[in-house]
């Protein structure tokens, strides 16, 4: 059981380049999330999705776009990468049911923008 | 403003002792509070959930308390081991349909 899988695991970009991070989950979860984690800042929510075809902004959405075309996949895009987007990106998923549902995380994508 | 604060960035304790980590929150009214463990280079892993009407929850050597009057949760690891060394995150939701909000975490080091 793979759980939440993120690709790629590492990436180095130049300023202005674009890329897409892929998250896939095999638990049939309705909700999916993208976070970034920076030293001293904790996990901050970028965007999330409560179902196929729906997305919503989180705490730090600027500079990112997302799409949820299939229930099992959640894509995070950087259209024009900036050094401030150097971070570790985590994807997570959970079931409908709100409060009591634990989130399941992938192991992250380490992204450096030069 | 809404805040979740974990009492310290780092905590060092000796093997065998009890580690106590604190999570305080402001301007939230969570019905549940969750605790996660994160190892270096890995994503957070869910450990325990405690409901507002539960004063205490236990799982093996872990114990969590939840005091809605103090707006605080305590996370205890008894008989700590070097393998317990990790960062521990608390998280809560203000309502069932809102995303989890995480504290910044406390990095625990258990020294043999």
Image (cartoon, helix red, strand yellow):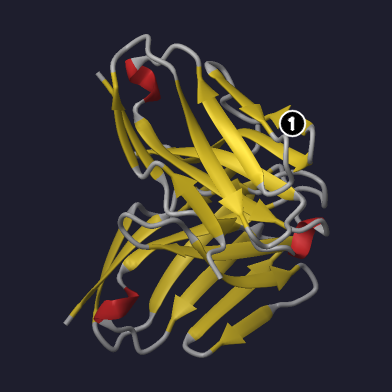
Q: Which residue does the numbered mark 1 point to in the structure image?
A: A55
Evaluate whether residue A105 shows in this view: yes
Give how far across and how far down residue A87 sits, in percent.
Answer: 37, 33
**Residue at image coords 29%, 78%:** B83
**Side of A114 where A95 appears, left or right:** right
Give how far across and how far down residue B44 sits, in percent.
Answer: 47, 59
Q: Residues within 10 Å of mark 1 (few under 14, many from 20)?
A: some
Q: Residue furthest front?
A: A70
Give how far across and how far down residue A80 sits, in percent.
Answer: 44, 11
Query: Is residue A43 shown above or below B50?
Result: above
Placement of the N terminus of chain A among the 4 image quadrants: bottom right
Q: Quadrant of residue A8?
A: top left
**Residue at image coords 58%, 49%:** A24
**Residue at image coords 57%, 86%:** B59
Query: Is residue A21 shown above or below A103?
Result: above
Looking at this view, is A37 or B1 the one in front? A37
Give how far across and how far down residue B56 sits, in percent.
Answer: 66, 80
Q: In terms of secondary structure, where does tag 1 sit? A: strand
Looking at this view, is B20 or A110 the one in front? A110
**Side of B71 where B6 appears, left or right:** left
Q: Quadrant of residue A7?
A: top left
Placement of the C terminus of chain A among the 4 image quadrants: top left
Evaluate whether residue B31 shows in this view: no
């Amino acid at each position: 059981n793979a759980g939440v899988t993120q690709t790629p695991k590492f990436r180095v970009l130049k300023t202005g380049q674009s890329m897409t991070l892929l998250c896939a989950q095999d638990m049939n979860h309705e909700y999916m999330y993208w976070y970034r984690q920076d030293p001293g800042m904790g996990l901050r929510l970028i965007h999330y999705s409560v179902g196929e075809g729906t997305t919503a902004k989180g705490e730090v959405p600027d500079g990112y776009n997302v799409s949820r075309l299939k229930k099992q996949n959640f894509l995070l895009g950087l259209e024009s990468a900036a050094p401030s987007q150097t971070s570790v990106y985590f994807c997570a998923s959970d079931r409908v049911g709100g409060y009591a549902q634990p989130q399941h995380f992938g192991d992250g994508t380490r992204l450096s923008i030069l | 403003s809404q805040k979740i604060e974990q009492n310290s960035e780092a905590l060092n304790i000796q093997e065998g002792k009890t580690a106590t980590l604190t999570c305080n929150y402001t301007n939230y009214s969570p019905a549940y509070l969750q605790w996660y463990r994160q190892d270096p280079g890995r994503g957070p892993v869910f450990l325990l959930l405690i409901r507002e009407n539960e004063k205490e929850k236990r799982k093996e050597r872990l114990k969590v308390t939840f005091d809605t009057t103090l707006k605080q949760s305590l996370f205890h690891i008894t008989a700590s081991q070097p393998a317990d060394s990790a960062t521990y995150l608390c998280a809560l939701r203000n309502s069932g349909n809102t995303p989890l909000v995480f504290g910044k975490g406390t990095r625990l080091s258990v020294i043999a």
